[in-house]
Amino acid sequence: MAEAALATRETAVDDPWHNAQRQFDAAADLLELDGGVRAFLREAERQLIVDFPVKMDDGSIRMFEGYRVQHNLARGPAKGGIRYHPQVTLNEIKALAMWMTWKCAAAGLPFGGAKGGVICDPKRLSRGELERLTRRYAAEISVLIGPERDIPAPDVNTTPQVMAWIMDTVSMSAGYSIPAAVTGKPLSVGGSQGRNEATGRGVSIVARRVCSRLGRDPRDLRVAVQGFGNAGSVAARLMAEGGFRIHAVSDTRGAVWSDTPLDMAALAAHKQRTGTVAGFPDGRPISNAELLEAPVDVLVPAALENQITAENAARIRAALVLEAANGPTTPDADEILSRRGATVVPDIIANAGGVIVSYFEWVQDLQSFFWEEAEINDRLARIITTAFDTAWTAAEHLHVPLRLGAYTVAVQRVAEATADRGIYP
């Protein structure tokens, strides 16, 4: 039954890998990319599948399946997060790895793209079980990862503590500490100031920049945020501080709407106390579908992929979509949103703050010299603003939507690196 469910999910119309390839194909067509380079960039270079045992608290042994995929290494070592989720699939990880390639290229970072994941529900694991799972998974993928080869980072349901366990596992095998093996670590073991807020901060910076381009005042704009996790909660708070009016938020357990702007501090305190935004007394409960289709000006999908699809895109009322999640909008939905004049800031630009500051952390670890948070935030703002402006200019020049403008920039950069390096042997 599990195999049948997996096959159904991976052959669905909204399969993430199929969508990622469609997005790449659109850019490759526009660039008239060389056939050989196109074929190479359309596939993942390496796909590692690991099945490994973990001793549970009751003494039993349970098997888990995990993945590490490297899409492309032309511009440097692979970079990409690790997610723990019961619905992780190989095709999802392949898509996320490809998106990381374009994201790093669009931001001008010297990285290729990678991603990893384990099929599990971390909420059903004890801390000890989670640590043992993490360490065994890290040992299994250690043939690929390392500071010069492939640098993991946090993603859905993984944390700085998980990164610390991975770094320690890699270090114990080598016999010395290797802090640059992962990013998104605690400060105590080589983490960077500003990393935890980096993705959400980048979204807020891009939000202000696109409003400036569109001639809109943030104080006039109503916002809905789907996904009140690390990225979504930080983006919501910083956007509210910048004048945006947050009217709806959601997490995995529920969603709330308020006719007046939500108090972000009170909402964060409620979630800290209860574990969810659901039940927030200053809002009324709504469904996830109602949040996506809410009467707002700005929608920030900050959860998982395939949230805006051909089925609901026509009902999305927001004129501006900021993709804080990876792959939340399918290609068919993109076409529908574009036809009605909505602006979609793609994930490879909107949520690039995380990998930008991960790059800073990697550099700091390699040189054992650390920067102050103000300097990190300033560097982040400069890089992500430049990435957005470059994508915007390309889109205007080519008369295409912003996603395709961003993709042409990123794909061209990776194609040039591939051509310059040549094909080995």
Image: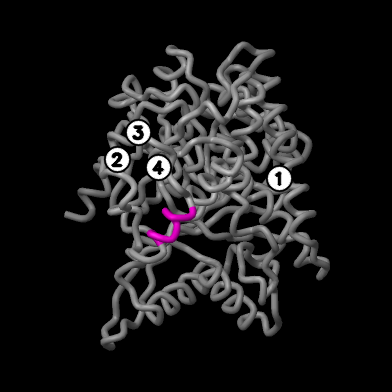
> Which amino acid type corresponds to the residue marked 4 in the rendered image?
Gln
Give the colouring mode of the picture: one colour
Secondary structure state at the residue bearing disc 3: helix
Secondary structure state at the residue bearing disc 2: helix
Secondary structure state at the residue bearing disc 1: loop
Q: Nearer the viewer, residue 201 or 94?
A: 201
Q: Residue at x 46, y 75 (%)?
A: 136
| Residue at image mark 1 | 424
Q: Nearer the viewer, residue 92 or 33?
A: 92
Secondary structure state at the residue bearing disc 4: strand
- Are the two marked residues, 2 and 3, in contact with CB atoms closer than 8 angstroms? yes
> Which amino acid type corresponds to the residue marked 2 in the rendered image?
Asn
Dot 1 crowding, Cα within 10 Å, few <14, some 14–19, many 20+: few
Percent coordinates x, y for residue 424 in the rendering = 71, 45
- Specify the quadrant of the image occupied by residue 152: bottom right
Q: Nearer the viewer, residue 84 or 226?
A: 226
| Residue at image mark 2 | 288
Dot 2 crowding, Cα within 10 Å, few <14, some 14–19, many 20+: many
| Residue at image mark 4 | 226
Percent coordinates x, y for residue 87 in the rendering = 32, 53
Asked if residue 267 is among those painted magenta in the image, a careful observer would answer yes
> In the orientation shown, which residue stands out farthest toward the bottom?
59
> Which numbered disc flags the more N-terminal residue, 2 or 1?
2
Whether residue 159 is situated above or below residue 97 in the rendered picture: below
Image position of 370 (left or right of 301) = right
